[in-house]
Amino acid sequence: LNSSRFASMLADRFDAVLIAVLIWRCVLMLYQAFSPYVVHSYDTSGAQSTLLPGLVRWDSLYFVTIAANDYQHDQNHAFFPGLAGYLKMAQQFTSDVSLAGLALNIASQAVVVMILPRVLAKLGVSRSTAKLATITYLLNPAVPFFNALYTESLYSALSTVTIYAWLCQQRLATAMLVCIASLVRSNGFLLIGFLLHDGVVALLQWDALDTIYIVGLGLLSSLSSVWIHFTNYSKYCYRDVAPLWCNNTPPMLYNYIQQHYWNVGFLKYYTLNQAPNIALALPVLAASGCLLKRIAMTYPIATRNLALPWLSATCTSQAKGWVVLGYYHLVLTLIAALMMNVQVATRFICSSSPLLHWYFATILENGSAGQQRLWLSYVVAFHVIGSTLFAAFLPWT
């Protein structure tokens, strides 16, 4: 099957392809959820008694513990309260955390499927490519984590809706969504960058009222992050013997936990022992580099001038959208590649930026047959291997 025939098939039989993708996702979810019943798990010491045990592994256990007992240990503070708060509320309807998590994941991914094409339409992407982007989102390589009781699905919905609100110039909604997203994941605060760009534009245009308004929205966006870090400081740093991190500048428990327990820091993960994990992250990092290059080549002037109209009279709203999103994606990529445990890059970027799903859609639509086969092999391998290892309590991305 050559690339043009493959693209034509996707366009002509989109509904059938979508149904096939949904069936694949259901099969994969059931395999991941129930495999612990037939496959021995490496470590069951912290396993929860749930109907779908394969969905409650690794970080999921922290969220379940926080929902049941609040933050009793400093290490738990690496996991923000948004998902745990949902689980606590869901206990009124079901005592099974796996079912509560599954319901949230389905709803969140449905939101992305509805909003993602609208985001891309605002950027001038064709309807056929936007529809394919929903397919590549549903088939993204981090699907095992989108199935599990993790923040990936919820955060992908929040980040996508936030970006759509910003593209629609709904600044108040954008600020409120950034505030909510920051309750779910620490990188939610990065979404404030969209308002920051608007603020710089207003400042350069000497629009005092607009600048003051955007500053106020920035403060609103920051409320949840400030609340989380201030609560942590108040809980631990007013003791007779305060932890050492209280003397740091800034005194943030989250940063200390990441460094102390997970060795997060600039290039700290690049050791010979971590070569397999680095290899797992290379595909998504390479794809990010390719899509950023494409944006820079399509909008060279706007890219050089940071999409600021004051510096570039030819910067259209469409160019601004692409370039600002591109810089946002660049920040995500640099953080994942240089600061984090790099194997997390796949799920980190897949849940944070719509550009990756657009780029994979262009491969399905216009890529060579070799590129299409490579993408399909990549996602299927990550789906099957990832679901198997994750459910068995074995390390994966």
Image: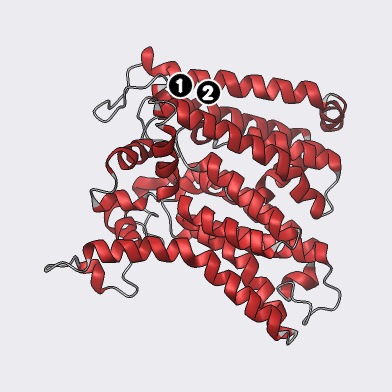
Residue 368, x across and y down, in percent: 78, 37
Q: Which of the numbered marks, if any, corresponds to residue 33? A: 1
Evaluate if marks 1 and 2 touch, with contact meaning CB atoms under 8 Å apart.
yes
Residue found at the very far left of the displayed protein: 240
Residue found at the very far front of the displayed protein: 92
Residue 94, x across and y down, in percent: 42, 26
Q: Is residue 140 above or below residue 44?
A: below
Residue 316 in view here: yes
**Quarter of the rendering occupied by the N terminus:** top right
Give the residue at mark 2: 29
Q: Which of the numbered marks, if any, corresponds to residue 137? A: none
Q: Amino acid at mark 1?
A: Ala
Crowd rating for badge 1 (residues with CA inside 10 Å; few <14, some 14–19, many 20+):
many
Quadrant of the rendered structure where residue 340 is? bottom left
Query: Of residues 229 and 387, which is closer to you in this image?
Result: 229
Crowd rating for badge 2 (residues with CA inside 10 Å; few <14, some 14–19, many 20+):
many
Query: Of residues 389 and 106, which is closer to you in this image?
Result: 106
Quadrant of the rendered structure where residue 66 is? top left
Residue 256, x across and y down, in percent: 30, 62
Say which residue appears at 84% left-offset and 24% top-offset: 13
Say which residue appears at 81% left-offset and 49% top-offset: 121
